[in-house]
Amino acid sequence: MIAIRRRHRRSRAGGFSIVEVLLAISITSLLLTSLLAALSASFRAYQATTESASRHTIARLTMHRLLAMIRTGTQFGPYPDNVITDPIIQSDYIEFVAADGTFVRVEYRDLDEALYVIVDPLGEAQEELLLTGVAPVFDEENERVPPFTLHYRRGPLLYRATIDLLIAEDREIDLRVEGSDVPPLRMVASTMPRKNL
């Protein structure tokens, strides 16, 4: 009988008390919470890096394409009212004849926050979306600055074209991870048409 009581006492002494179990659960939950917070932060950092890299790549390719089209184009528009007294015009579009002879118009639409390319090879306009997520640019007086600045010289010949784009977050493209903190990307570039020199 004494041997049975000793075995019973030993089995009680080897277990955990309710306080020890609750303490272990509390420590485990704290560790899991901190692990999930770190995982969430890494997902947000991944999203920010991915969106930033994607935005940079798309913006640079678009800018390169625009500059190449302007560099090889001729017969540019729009023209200022008086090219001699005021040779610089700012516009939401630029028109030109491309290297293959087609009439091209690149147009910024403020409502869509997008750039469109309109090609008219046979008199029937073909419209193509070039870039979305292009936010308007504002100056110090809070007035919107058109994305195209055209500087003419010697009459209707374009001397230099400057493109000023603010590539912001595209609302239609999202990685579905909360916490997007990617700043907008502003790109400014100038080019001179080769055939007008």
Image (cartoon, rainbow, N blue to C red):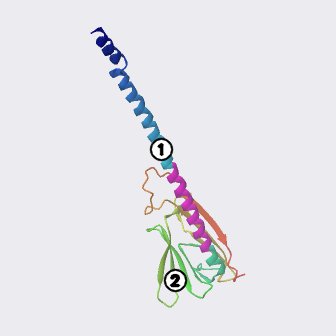
Residue at numbered disc 2: 119
Residue 27, above or below 176? above
Magenta span: helix, strand or loop, mainly? helix
Left or right of 142 on screen, residue 67: right
Bounds of the magenta span? 45-66
Numbered circle sitting on residue 30? none
Sequence-wise, the earlier of marks 1 and 2 is 1
Numbered circle sitting on residue 39? 1
Residue 165, above or below 129? above
Is 77 in front, or is 154?
77
Helix, strand or loop for disc 2: strand
Q: How far apart are marks 1 and 2 (CA)?
A: 48 Å
Is 161 in front, or is 179?
179
Viewer can see residue 86: no
Reply yes or no: does residue 53 show up in magenta: yes
The residue shown at (49%, 90%) is 123
**Which amino acid, by three-letter code, is at mark 1?**
Leu
Q: Farthest residue toward the top?
A: 2
Tell me residue 136's x, y (percent). 51, 63
The residue shown at (45%, 62%) is 173
**Which amino acid, by three-letter code, is at mark 2?**
Val
Q: Quadrant of the C terminus?
A: bottom right
Q: Farthest residue toward the bottom?
A: 122
Q: In which quarter of the image is the N terminus?
A: top left
Tell me residue 48's x, y (percent). 52, 53
Is 14 in front, or is 94?
14
Report if the CB atoms under discs 1 and 2 are less than 8 Å apart: no
Q: Label 1 crowding class (10 Å Cα cut-off): few <14, some 14-19, many 20+? A: few
Tag in front: 1 or 2: 1
